[in-house]
Image (tube, rainbow, N blue to C red):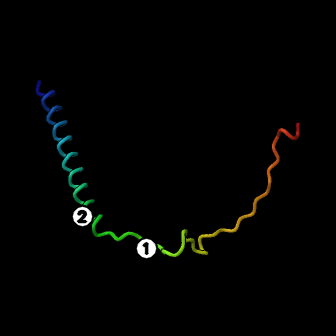
Amino acid sequence: MSLLRLIIWGLIFYIVSKVIRNVMQVLKNDDTRESVNPPKRNVNSKINIDKKDIIEAQFEELKSNNESK
């Protein structure tokens, strides 16, 4: 019976600690959301793409195996 009580108390402690940790994380996230500024975008353009983001690539067509049969 004492082993069963130990397991039950362990489960209760685990659940309570998880609930407290989750509540603290939610409270912490609410505070940080207010302080974070949204990223600024150029209002005049629909899409803001920098030249450094564009990558040149070369493609070659692959022949399927069905054509060789």
In the rendered image, the residue lying farthest to the top is 1
Q: Amino acid at mark 2?
A: Asp
Task: Decide which of 45, 50 is in the foreground and name it.
Answer: 45
What percent of the width, then of the height, locates residue 47?
A: 55, 68
> SS at mark 1?
loop
Horizontally, is 29 left or right of 56 in the view?
left
Q: Amino acid at mark 1?
A: Lys
User: Does 29 appear above or below 42?
Assistant: above
> SS at mark 2?
helix
Rendering quarter of residue 5? top left
What percent of the width, then of the height, locates residue 39?
A: 41, 71
Horizontally, is 60 left or right of 44 in the view?
right
Tell me the residue that label 1 is attached to: 40
Tell me the residue that label 2 is attached to: 31
Query: Which residue is at a point 65% across and 68% down the rendered structure image?
Result: 55
Query: Which residue is at a point 24% across and 60% down the rendered structure image?
Result: 28
Specify which label sits upstream in the sequence, 1 or 2: 2
Rendering quarter of residue 65? top right
